[in-house]
Structure formats: structure tokens, C-alpha cells
């Protein structure tokens, strides 16, 4: 005996038909989220789940930035769905960063703290966890290589001082700059930040590669560990003009994407 048909009967087919006839830009945020969740929910009604996610976190952006454990607290979101949302969130962040850094000239010398911050800051946009970057420079202080060592707190990330030194040596780096972010706090370096900085500096010194600086960035300021002795008196350098200019570019890029 057939049951009574509901609104959701054939709903996925109708959504896919709309996608074929138009484009993703024609869909509301919750509809895009709903269709994304099709890939981890073969039969469950993901429309209600999409609404619940946006209601719980406040916006699509915050859904994609949320921790997987927090996503799983929402009814209808399992481990696979949470992992998918986190993956899409990180892909979106990297896409936006790549778009706004595409015009950076690798041949431009980073010969001042301002230029270093302008180069490094966009790499952290949209990051909700700490990320630790190592920037290798050539003899002209131009970018030679940039790589992320890991994410999480600096004290818990399995940072290998030896691996950083070895990569700098293999790439024939003339100098090194370190940078990591405090996404939910101030730019005041922790004792772990300072200790790690000096450990890496000593390891690089054995290879005669100078560590120029280790920057700690927050939402609107940065600290320079090696060239700032009294963090309590002046915990961070206000960098509003630099930050505002780059963030405006970043927000415009996200708008172009939507």
C-alpha cells in the first residue's frame, strides 16, 4: 500500500533540475548547504538540517568555519557531514586567499616589516585555528618558499625545528621569517612562542641562516618577537591601514565569489 505523498517526495530531483536550468548563484545559502549535504546523506531530508545549521551558527560562513565537534551537535549532522563541511570551508578559504594573493610579485623584496606583513597577512584570512608559516627568502629578500608547518596551538603542533632548518638549507635560503596567528586572541606572544622562536633561531644559526623575525598576528595587530623586548609596555603594533586595505580586498573577493 502506498503512503501519502509529502512535499519532500521528488524534492531532490526538483533541486537538481533547478541547478541544471540555472546556476549555483541563483540558490539561497540554505539551499546550497542542503544540496551539499546530499553527498553524505543518501535519504535523510537535508533541508531541515541546512536550516538548523544556519540557525545554530548564524550564517553560512560561520557554518563553514565551525569546529567539526560543534557541527555534530546539530541534529542531522554526523561525522561524515561535519568532515565535508570542514573540507569545503578550508577549500573556500584557500580559494579566496589565492585570489587576493595572485598578483603578489615574487620578485618584490620584503625589505621592511610592513612589506612582510602585507605578504603574510592574507594567508591567515578566514583561519579559525592557529597556522604556523615559514617564509624563506633569497639574498635579495624576495620570497623563495612559503610553507605551513601545521595548525593548532604552537605548543601542541608537532613542529620540528630540525625539519625547518633542513628545508631552509635545501632551498638555499638566505634568511627566514616565521609567522603564526592568534585567531581568537591578541597578538601578545606566549612564552611558548618566544621559546620556540629562539630554538629555531639557534638551529638556523648553525647553518649561518639568519632568522629575521617571528610575527604573531591577531585580527588587527601584530607583534614582532625578536625586535620587541617589552610586550607588556607595547604588546602589539597597530596595523590598521595595512589590515584594512587587505581585508577589504579579501571581502571583495568573497563577494565576487557569491
Image (cartoon, rainbow, N blue to C red):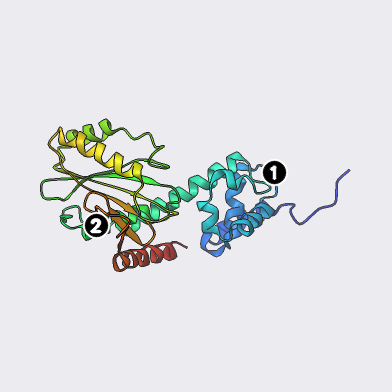
Residue receiving disc 2: 104
Q: Position of residue 30 (x, y in %)?
A: 60, 59
Q: Secondary structure at mark 2?
A: loop
Q: Where 194 falls versus 115 (above or below)?
A: above
For this view, does 229 lie left or right of residue 254?
Answer: left
In the orientation shown, which residue stands out farthest toward the right? Answer: 1
Q: Earlier in the sequence, mark 2 or mark 1?
A: 1
In the picture, measured across the screen, residue 9 lies left or right of residue 134, that is: right
Query: Residue drawn 60% across and 39% down?
Result: 79
Crowding around mark 2 (Cα neighbors within 10 Å: few <14, some 14 to 19, many 20+) is few
Q: CA distance from mark 2 to mark 1?
A: 46 Å
Give whichever of 256, 87 is nearer the camera: 87
Horizontally, residue 75 falls left or right of residue 152, namely right
> Which residue does the image show at 38% across and 41% down from the upper left?
154
Q: Is residue 10 left or right of residue 160?
A: right
Q: Residue furthest left?
A: 139
Name the image quarter holding residue 84: top right
Residue beneath the point at 21% across and 34% down: 203
Q: Is residue 238 above or below residue 69?
A: below
Quadrant in which the N terminus appears = top right
The picture places residue 192, in percent across and down from the top left corner, at 35, 41
Residue 165 falls in image quadrant:
top left
Name the element at disc 1. loop
Identify the residue shown where x is 49% and y is 45%: 87
Label 1: how many Cα within 10 Å (few below 14, some 14–19, many 20+): few
Q: Nearer the viewer, residue 175 or 48?
A: 175
* Rendered image: mark on residue 162: none
Q: Which residue is mark 1?
A: 43
Q: Do labels 2 and 1 touch, CB within 8 Å?
A: no
Amino acid at each position: 500500500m502506498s503512503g501519502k505523498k509529502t512535499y519532500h517526495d521528488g524534492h531532490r530531483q526538483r533541486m537538481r533540475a533547478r541547478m541544471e536550468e540555472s546556476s549555483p548563484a541563483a540558490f539561497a545559502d540554505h539551499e546550497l548547504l542542503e544540496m551539499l549535504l546530499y553527498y553524505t546523506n543518501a535519504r535523510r531530508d537535508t533541508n531541515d538540517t541546512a536550516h538548523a545549521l544556519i540557525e545554530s551558527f548564524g550564517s553560512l560562513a560561520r557554518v563553514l568555519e565551525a569546529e567539526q565537534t560543534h557541527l555534530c551537535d546539530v541534529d542531522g549532522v554526523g561525522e561524515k557531514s561535519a568532515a565535508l563541511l570542514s573540507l569545503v570551508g578550508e577549500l573556500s578559504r584557500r580559494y579566496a586567499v589565492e585570489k587576493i594573493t595572485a598578483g603578489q610579485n615574487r620578485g618584490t623584496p620584503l625589505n621592511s616589516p610592513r612589506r612582510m606583513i602585507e605578504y603574510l597577512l592574507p594567508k591567515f584570512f578566514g583561519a579559525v585555528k592557529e597556522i604556523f608559516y615559514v617564509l624563506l627568502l633569497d639574498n635579495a629578500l624576495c620570497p623563495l618558499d612559503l610553507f605551513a608547518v601545521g595548525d593548532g596551538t604552537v605548543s601542541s603542533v608537532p613542529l620540528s625545528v630540525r625539519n625547518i632548518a633542513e628545508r631552509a638549507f635545501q632551498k638555499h635560503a638566505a634568511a627566514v621569517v616565521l609567522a603564526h596567528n592568534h585567531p581568537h586572541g591578541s597578538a601578545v606572544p606566549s612564552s611558548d612562542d618566544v621559546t620556540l622562536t629562539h630554538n629555531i633561531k639557534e638551529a638556523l644559526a648553525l647553518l649561518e641562516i639568519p632568522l629575521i623575525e617571528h610575527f604573531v598576528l591577531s585580527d588587527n595587530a601584530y607583534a614582532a618577537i625578536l625586535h620587541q623586548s617589552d610586550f607588556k609596555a607595547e604588546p602589539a603594533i597597530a596595523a590598521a591601514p595595512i589590515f584594512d586595505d587587505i581585508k577589504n580586498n579579501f571581502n571583495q573577493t568573497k563577494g565576487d565569489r557569491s
